[in-house]
Image: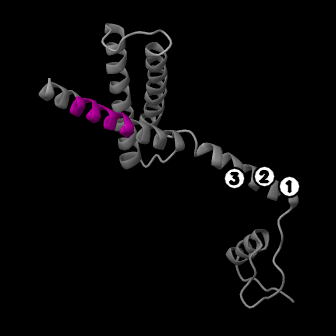
């Protein structure tokens, strides 16, 4: 098959089609296969894409992840401080620790929700911060309702 090109633009277009593996109009036959090395690079890039989805992409998402870590550390300290140490719930240290835990949980929820809605940061860390922060809000609401009901009965 002889090719007759009348301009440089036609030559460049034909070379691009040839190098990209696309077939010219009307031509049939097997497509060009990618090399095994290129397939390995693409698979490795897909694996990196999964890892990238784990970590937040925005600054607000990183804040949500940090506040989630603070919330979890304070929650563990609160649980360990009450049970093995034998501290009573009215101790000043336990009250301050509980308040700080709730504040960091609510802040993780707010920053995670804003990061998801405004900046479309749907990483695993941001979603976890939003979910666990929502649970912190639910716990706070239950504590307030329990306090109100306790005061009304005593």
Label 1 SS: helix
Q: State which quadrant residue 60 falls in.
A: top left
Figure check: 138 above or below 66: below
Dot 3: element: helix
- Camera-side residue: 134 or 33? 134
Say which residue label 3 marks. 46
Vertical placement of 126 versus 72: above or below? below
Is residue 31 on the magenta stretch? no
The answer to whether residue 138 is magenta is: yes
Disc on res. 41: 2
Q: Are marks 2 and 1 in contact (CB under 8 Å)?
A: yes
Disc 1 crowd, CA 10 A, few/some/many (<14, 14-19, 20+)? few
Residue 39 vertical placement versus 90 (above, below): below
Query: Do the residues bearing badges 3 and 2 touch, measured as CB atoms within 8 Å?
Result: no
Name the spot of residue 87 as percent of width and height, x first.
40, 9
Say whether residue 80 is left or right of residue 16: left
Q: Is residue 104 left or right of residue 36?
A: left
For disc 1, the marked residue is 37
Residue at figure coordinates x 74%, y 91% from the top left: 26
- Quarter of the image for the N terminus: give it: bottom right
Residue 134 in picture, x, y percent from top left: 36, 40
Q: Name the residue nearer the viewer: 10 or 131.
A: 131
Q: Residue at x 78, y 73 (%)?
A: 18
Callout in the foreground (3, 1): 3
Of discs 3 and 2, which sits in the foreground? 3
Start and end of the magenta stretch?
134-146
- Identify the mark at residue 19; answer none if there is no mark: none
Q: Quadrant of residue 55?
A: top right
**126 and 95: which is toward the camera:** 95
Local SS, label 2: helix
């Amino acid at each position: 098959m002889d090719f007759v090109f009348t301009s440089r633009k036609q030559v460049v277009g034909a070379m691009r089609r040839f190098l990209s593996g696309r077939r010219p109009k009307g031509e049939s036959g097997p497509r060009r296969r990618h090399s095994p090395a290129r397939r390995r690079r693409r698979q490795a890039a897909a694996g990196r894409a999964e890892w990238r989805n784990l970590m937040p992409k925005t600054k607000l998402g990183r804040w949500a992840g940090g506040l989630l870590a603070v919330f979890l550390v304070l929650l563990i300290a609160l649980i360990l401080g009450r049970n093995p140490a034998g501290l009573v719930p009215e101790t000043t240290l336990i009250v301050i620790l509980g308040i700080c835990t709730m504040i960091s949980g609510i802040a993780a929820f707010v920053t995670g929700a804003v990061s998801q809605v405004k900046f479309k940061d749907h990483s695993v860390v941001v979603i976890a911060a939003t979910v666990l922060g929502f649970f912190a809000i639910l716990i706070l609401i239950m504590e307030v309702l329990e306090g109100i009901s306790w005061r009304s009965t005593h």
